[in-house]
Each structure stands twice: as structure tokens, then as C-alpha cells.
Amino acid sequence: MLKKAHNKRKKLTSFQVIILSFLGMILVGALLLMLPFSSRERCVTPFSDSLFTAVSATCVTGLVVKDTATYWSLFGQAVILLLIQIGGMGVITIGLAIMRASGRKIGLWQRSTMQESISAPQVGGMVRMTGFILKTSAIIEFIGAALLFPVFSRDFGIAKGLWYSVFHSVSAFCNAGFDLMGVREKFSSLTTYSSSIYVNSVIMLLIIAGGIGFLVWNDMCVHKYHFRRYSLQSKVVLLTSFLLIVLPALFFFFYEYEGVNLHDRFIYSLFQSVTTRTAGFNTTDLTQMDESGTAIMIMLMLIGGSPGSTAGGMKTATFAVLSLSAITVFVRRDDVQVFKRRIPEEAVHNAAAILFMYIVLFFTGGMIISRTEHLPLMTGLFETGSAIGTVGLTLGVTTTLSALSRVILMMLMFFGRVGGLTLIYAALPSAESRHCRMPLGKISVG
């Protein structure tokens, strides 16, 4: 009896499983990338470089120390793409899919872990949701690759164009930001297609599709155009995502690209607003941005995508809850409300905790990198904002960073992908619920 109770206490929690699964995938990816045939030069890649690449790919970030197109072989690129795909959909999702395909029974514990992995509101329907995630990802990525193929086959040939189409479709949908355009100029991202409204539109739609989350896609498939029937989370996510695309795009249009012709100005502004929210592709030189534009980009990177999506960051729902909470204080209302629904206090507390963690780690990491590398503080903050938001944009300093700065970025990328609360819940035991409460004490704030 005692032994049975002891084994029960030692069982891993859902949060610990999520973290260990990501760590395991990163380690396997790093070891594969170290192999001689993973690089074009057929040399053993240093573990520090392969580890950084594996973390960036699994955490769908896009920060790189080696140009993806010119350094890695086809096998190495395939490993990176596999890590992006698994990291985007979630290691737990892939694991459950394998269990389901092999005919193994999926118990309550596995369903609970899946629920935590995709931030689902309830444990019911997790097996069906796993299948839905796989189908949705496959369909959208296939459509994206088919739309990109005419352009890439024209520019790179049939075989290479097909590979480029698949790679960039998966990378865009998973909000990873990895690209193969280094064959034209190293670390150039999509700058050679900066004026192509077709390529920009396809990439933006893929980014948005991956960033709004599978729970929202499920609502859209079930309820179609009946917006009123959507869940509260879907409504909040869609509205917040729309505002976070349109408002920054207007800012970039009027203040960042004033000297550009109207056609390119529109494309640059809209793409910049979309890609900053964890995607990591860029079509213009970010070092030429004004400091106000850079600050807006950092804010968007920190917010990131939506819960249960392929994107990272502190999430659109978190930002929305915090904004609504502030409005509630301003108008002196008792409850946080939106769409004629009351938001639970637990959600407000969680959002505040997430914001606190992100701000502390973002500023601390940025200051350390700035001090260590002798860089302007804004440059250091841009790197850490890009890492913790799993974005992948850079002001061109990632490849020159020291070992300490790279470790900081890897830790922030991991934190941004698995989620701050997941890490905290995995590390700290849950407090026992008590019926008694401490006496109320008053404290003044603001």
C-alpha cells in the first residue's frame, strides 16, 4: 500500500511532461544536426550551434546562427522542418496521434496533458481535437505550398521550387520564420519578394491561420459564419488579432515608410504588422526602422499569437484580459466583462502573472545582452523580445553574440514556447486548498 502511494506521488504532472517532451525533442534535433551529413560541408557542427538551431526550430522562433539555406544540407533542412512541424503543432499532439494510430488506449491522464498543451477549456473531446489539429495543419500547409509553388518553381526550378514551397508553407503556418532564401543573399529572409503582393499575401494568410489557434478554427468549422455562437475565447481572439494587425499597420504606413511608393508602402506596412506577431519573416531592412517603430514591434512580439496556436508570446487573450481589466478599473466596474460575459478572476490573475514574468525576463535578458555585448539597450531588448515572443526577427546581431547571450536567448525561446505558467506549475508543487483564509488587509496602489 505504501509503495503504491509512493509511486502515485512520483508520477509526473501534465506540465512536467510537456516540458520534458520539448526538451527531449530539442536534444534529439541537436544531435541529428551535429551529424556530418546535416551540413553542406559534411563537417560536424559544434553542439552549441546545433543546439541553438534545434531550440529555435522546436520553439518555432527563427533566430539562427547559421544560414539555413547555405549551411545545412537537404537532410539538415529536413530535420529543421520536422522540428518546426512538431514544435508548431505540439509534441504532445504528435505523441497522442501516434498512440491513436497504433491502437493504444488514450486515458484520462493523456487527455489532461493534451488539454494543458493546447490550452483547451475542458478535457472532453481531446482525441477528436488531436485529429482536427493534424487535419487542419495538413490542409492549410498543402494549400499554402500549392499557392507558393508557381512562384518558387519559376525562380528555382521544379524540384527545388517544390521543396521551397513546402518548407516556407510549414514555416509560415507554424509561425517559425525559417527560410531558404539565403541562396540569394545570406540571412536575407523574404526581402527579394518585398514588392510581390502575391507572395506576401500567401505568407501573411499562413501566419494568421497558424496564429489564431486551433480552438478558433474548430469554432469556425462548427459554427461557420454565425459569430454569435462562437466561444468567448474565439470572439476575443479574433477581435484582438484584427486590431493588432490593423492598428500597427496604420502606424507603419504613415510613419515608417513615408518615402516609399503607395503600392510597396501598403505591402510593407501590413506584412510588418503581421509577421511581428511571432512569425519572424522580414521583407525590409529592420535596422532602418525608427525607434518608435522598433518599440511597436517589440510590443507586438511580446504579445505574440493566440492560445492553442502554433505561435508563442504571452498571447492575444492575455493582452485582451489585461486591457479589459484596466478598463474595468477606469470605469469602476466590479467585474471584467466583454461580449456580455464576465471573465473569471482566475483568468485576470493568470494574465497579470504572465505579464509580470514576461516583462522581468525580457528586460533582464535585454540588459544583460546589452551590457555583455556592448550593444545599445534597444538592440538587446529587440533580441530578447524576439526570443521570448518566439518571433525570430533580429537587428543583425544574433550571429555575433557570445555564448552567454546565446544561452539567454535559448532559455527565453523555450520559456516563450512552453509558456511561463507551465514552467512555474511544473517546478512548484500545487498549494493545498484550505477552507480558512487570512484576515483582509488593505494596501494602496497607484
Image (cartoon, grey):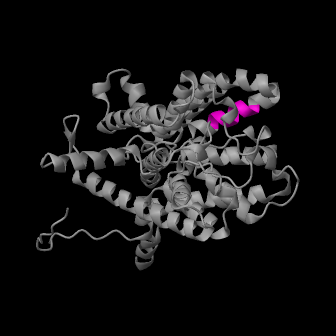
27 on left or right of 413: right
Q: Which residue lies furthest to the bottom in this view?
A: 2
Quadrant holding the C terminus = bottom left
The magenta region covers: 163-170
Q: Is residue 298 magenta?
A: no
Between residues 34 and 385, which one lies in front from this camera angle? Answer: 385
Residue drawn at x 15%, y 71% is 437
In the rendered image, the vertical position of residue 147 relative to residue 9, given as above or below: above
| Residue 121 in picture, x, y percent from top left | 34, 45
Q: Quadrant of residue 224?
A: top left
The answer to whether residue 136 shows anywhere in this view is: no
| Residue 345 in picture, x, y percent from top left | 22, 53
Between residues 157 and 360, which one lies in front from this camera angle? Answer: 360
Quadrant holding the N terminus = bottom left
- Magenta: main secondary structure equals helix
| Residue 375 in picture, x, y percent from top left | 59, 63
Residue drawn at x 20%, y 70% is 434
In the rendered image, the vertical position of residue 368 relative to residue 266, given as above or below: below
Between residues 7 and 60, which one lies in front from this camera angle? Answer: 60
| Residue 100 in picture, x, y percent from top left | 56, 43
Residue drawn at x 51%, y 57% is 378
Q: Which residue lies furthest to the right in this view?
A: 42
349 on left or right of 92: left
